[in-house]
Amino acid sequence: MNLTPQQAMRAAVAVPGVPRDEDGPVFREPWEARAFAMALALHEAGVFTWREWAETLGAEIKRAQAAGDPDTGETYYQHWLATLETLVAAKGVTTSDVLHRYRDAWDHAADRTPHGAPIELAPGDFG
Amino acid sequence: MTGHDHDHHDHHHHHDHDHSELSETELRVRALESILTEKGYVDPASLDLLIDLYEKKIGPRNGIRVVAKAWSDPAYHVRLMKDATAAIAELDYSGRQGEHMVVVENTPDQHNMVVCTLCSCYPHPVLGLPPVWYKSAPYRSRAVSDPRGVLQDFGVALPETTKIRVWDSTAEIRYLVLPMRPKGTDGWSAEQLAELVTRDSMIGTGLPKQPGETA
């Protein structure tokens, strides 16, 4: 399954607020591009429509703003990431427990990895 | 270092080992990617392919301007070597929060190469998104153990007498290599010189183009 720039452009048009230029989405950091591409892959797999995505993302942004998010655009992909976590749980792709377990496992992997070695996830990282 | 913000910064390195070397955001992104990969929703290689496209687009334009100006403006060169963060900001690329830039200059005696052995810290404001190989485990480990071999893989052969120094990026310090100005470019303008600067030459895995090599 390959992801194409055409799909990316359609997503950037379908979802309000995606930072973009005439060619498609623009990112400030690699993790933002990864989070964007993961949503794209899930959409292509039929897990959600862009309409569902936009609704969930909109609710996430409202919630964050109510909690004091400055909404300067800097945090857009933070909300994007939260939306990913919400929707994968809501659609039964995984559960929030599993997400936490993997997050902690990566944390463990990072902690045991000395500076100078790449961080890789190993079975022993799951507590 | 204390008081950093878990949510909004990425790629924090903490050498005091008081807690994770990855930011909260990066941990969550990695957790998702691991799960989605295991379940077959995501193919990391196809993520890389797509992200590669944006990396070229955002590209190293800002870094190219910095290098070309340093080559053509001696006073700027001095400022850049003294305080790279400020000299780069002069050209109006606001660096992100707390990223301290250091420029390392190539000479006939020393070639500089940049890596982030831990993850993929990279001077985004000047070089855009990193190439996929920069983030790969083989590059990250071999850049330290066998820099000359890595350079050979990139088609760069340096004289035996040139030392190779490898700089390991952190969240606090990002390095930019200032390549040697190609010979035969006396009197060239900054715009002409910019044509010779490549992304890899600013990471240290390549050399600038030579006059006549530009398309």
Image: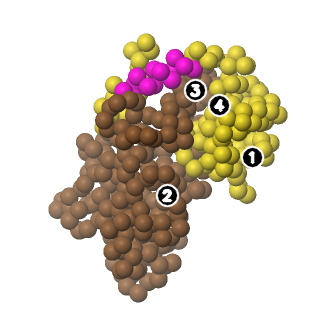
Chain colours: A yellow, B brown
The residue carrying mark 2 is: B95
- Contact check, label 1 and label 4, Cβ < 8 Å: no
Q: Chain of mark 2?
A: B
- CA–CA distance between discs 1 and 2? 23 Å
Looking at the rendered structure, the kind of residue marked 1 is Gly
Tell me the kind of residue under disc 3. Answer: Leu
Which label is found at residue A82?
4
Chain ID of residue with mark 4: A
Residue A57's x, y, as percent? 74, 34
Q: Magenta stretch?
A: A99-111
B84 relative to A85 in the view: left or right? left
Q: How many marks?
A: 4
How far apart marks 3 and 4 lie (CA) works out to 11 Å
Q: Same chain for marks 1 and 2? A: no
Q: Are marks 2 and 3 on the same chain?
A: yes
Name which residue lies at 20% across and 58% down.
B163
Q: CA distance from mark 2 to mark 4?
A: 26 Å
Q: Is residue A106 part of the magenta span, yes or no? A: yes
Asked if residue A12 lies in the magenta stretch, the reply is no
- x and y percent of residue A99 in the render? 57, 20
Please tell me whether residue B1 is drawn above or below residue A82 in the rendered image: below
Establish if B65 lies above or below B202.
below
Mark 4 secondary-structure assignment: helix
